[in-house]
Each structure stands twice: as C-alpha cells, then as structure tokens.
Amino acid sequence: MTTANYTVTGMTCGHCVQAVTEEVSALAGVTDVSVELEGGRMTVTSEQPLDLSQLAEAVDEAGDYQVAQA
C-alpha cells in the first residue's frame, strides 16, 4: 500500500468534494480517498503509486478542478 498527498484547486462546495472523491475512488487500485474542501487537500491510498496524469484525468472528469502533488 502507498499513500500520497495532493492539492486540488477549484473546489467550492461539498458537492465538489463528493464528485472528486467518487471519480478518484473509481481508479484501479485505489483503496481510500480523503478530500478536504478547506485547503484543497486530498490523500489517496492505493495498492501501488498512481500515475499523476491518470489521477489528473479523474479529477478533471469530476469537474473543473486541477490536481498537483503536494
């Protein structure tokens, strides 16, 4: 298992948090996702390290949000 921290920008409400959480949780190998609206922090636990481009695509699919490694 591996845990990585990211910053997500563009989220403004609880719905944003829910959308990002659902999209990232659907990625293969992801076992846990924690997203905090305040500060835009996201912690992802997965079986193996995630490809940042794949993660960015999932976050973008959730809405007009951007992700960066924290």
Image: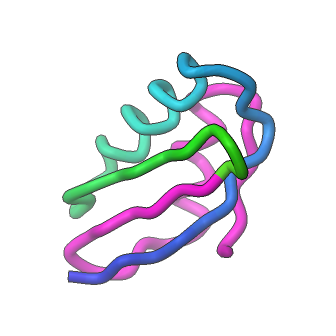
Q: How many marks?
A: 0
Which residue: 37% across, 32% down? Answer: 22
Q: Quadrant of residue 14?
A: top right
Whether 56 is drawn above or below 13: the answer is below
Where is residue 33? Give x, y as percent. 35, 52
Q: Would you say residue 57 sits in the magenta stretch?
A: yes
State the extent of the magenta-drawn residues as a range: 41-70
Q: Residue at x 72, y 51 (%)?
A: 39
Residue drawn 20% across the image and 82% down it: 1
Please name whichever residue, 29 or 68, is drawn nearer the observer in this view of the structure.
Answer: 68
Q: Position of residue 12 (x, y in %)?
A: 74, 25
- Give percent across and percent down for residue 29: 22, 63
Question: Which quarter of the figure is the C terminus placed in?
Answer: bottom right
Is residue 64 in the magenta section?
Answer: yes
> Residue lying furthest front in this view?
38
Q: Is residue 7 above or below residue 60?
A: below
Quadrant hosting residue 7: bottom right
- Residue name at image x 51 percent, y 36 percent: 20
48 lies above or below 33: below
Which colour style is shown? rainbow
Residue placed most toward the observer, 35 or 2: 35
Relative height, residue 21 to residue 8 (above, below): above
